Image (spheres, helix red, strand yellow):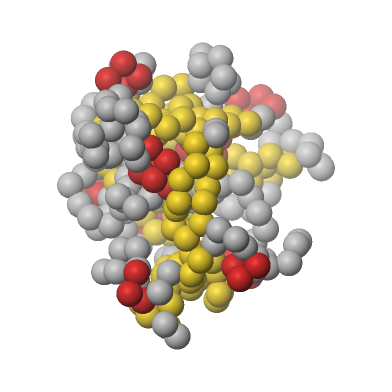
Amino acid sequence: MGSPFDVSASSTSTYRSCLDCADPTRADCRDGLCVLSQRYAEGSSWVASQVSDVADLGGKEARVTFGCHVEETGMFLKQRTDGIMGLAMHKDGIVAALTAGEPGSGGGRAAFALCFTPTGGLMKIFPPPLFPEANKFGDKADLRDMEGGYYSIAVTAVRLGGSALTGAARTLAAFNRNNGVVLDSGTTDTYLPKAVKGDFEGAWRRETGWEHGNEPRAIGSEEFEMLPDLVFTFEGGGEMAISPSSYMDSTDNPFGVYTSRVYLEEPSGAILGSNAFMYREILFHGEEGRVGWRDVDDCYGGG
């Protein structure tokens, strides 16, 4: 791992002072500088100084604000660069900065799409108006009307294979409580509410004949083919199926050993992380209050 980034040695980077905080309602002041912090349900946390610098994406330069960590706990102490990136729905976010001043933008929020496959991914940014591109995404869901920067949607049903997980009102409510179901490319795995743990484990047992867990397990090819999809139906009519090839993490040594990356520990709501994005392209369109998606074999051919 390289040396920590030195802002003072950069010709373009500057710390943001307490008089110039991005999103001051969520920032704190420490030693004259703006700081952000975040704590996660599993106990990890970070504190970061706000830094402004110039970003270049596909030849388009823009000044953006981001956080440089100054304190870390939990998983961040041992985490290495992993290639994931979260993009909040925010007027000062990198997507808005990179499309500011584009012809036709009219001050509206840009849309962006993320495409993930095991061999690579693709990010697209669309200055408004988006209309022709949006028509390519057949499945759609309505974003919830809430603040906080999350791409949050409400579910009407969740099932594991042929077994319903939201047959009871309490389990459906657990998915939609607080932030609801959040699409988060900055989280690696998929997290379901603790309230559904018994229903999920029972459904897994019926579907597979063995107990669900998050420990490595040897699985034969025929057994793997029989594993169930995890399927979400959203308000707005869209349906998203997370396949075993997405939620089961394989290891090369020994071959045929897999680990489930579906965790049953969220206090409320759910997080569909980057493994839920695998083999699909997802369009995030905050201005229209919608997300859309389509399944793909690769990110460049589109099908």
Residue lying farthest to the right in this orientation: 253
Residue 144: image quadrant is top left
Would residue 211 be visible to someone looking at this image?
no
Position of 270 compared to 2: left or right?
left
Residue lying farthest to the bottom in this orientation: 31
Residue 172, percent from left and from top: 25, 46
Residue at (33%, 74%) from the top-left corner? 19
Residue at (30%, 50%) from the top-left corner? 91
Residue 13, percent from left and from top: 54, 62
Q: Nearer the viewer, residue 39 or 100?
A: 100
Residue 258, percent from left and from top: 67, 42
Residue at (27%, 20%) from the top-left corner? 131
Q: Nearer the viewer, residue 257 or 283?
A: 283
Quarter of the N terminus within the rendering = bottom right
Q: Nearer the viewer, residue 249 or 292?
A: 292
Position of 104 compared to 32: left or right?
left
Residue at (64%, 50%) from the top-left corner? 82
Would residue 12 be visible to someone looking at this image?
yes
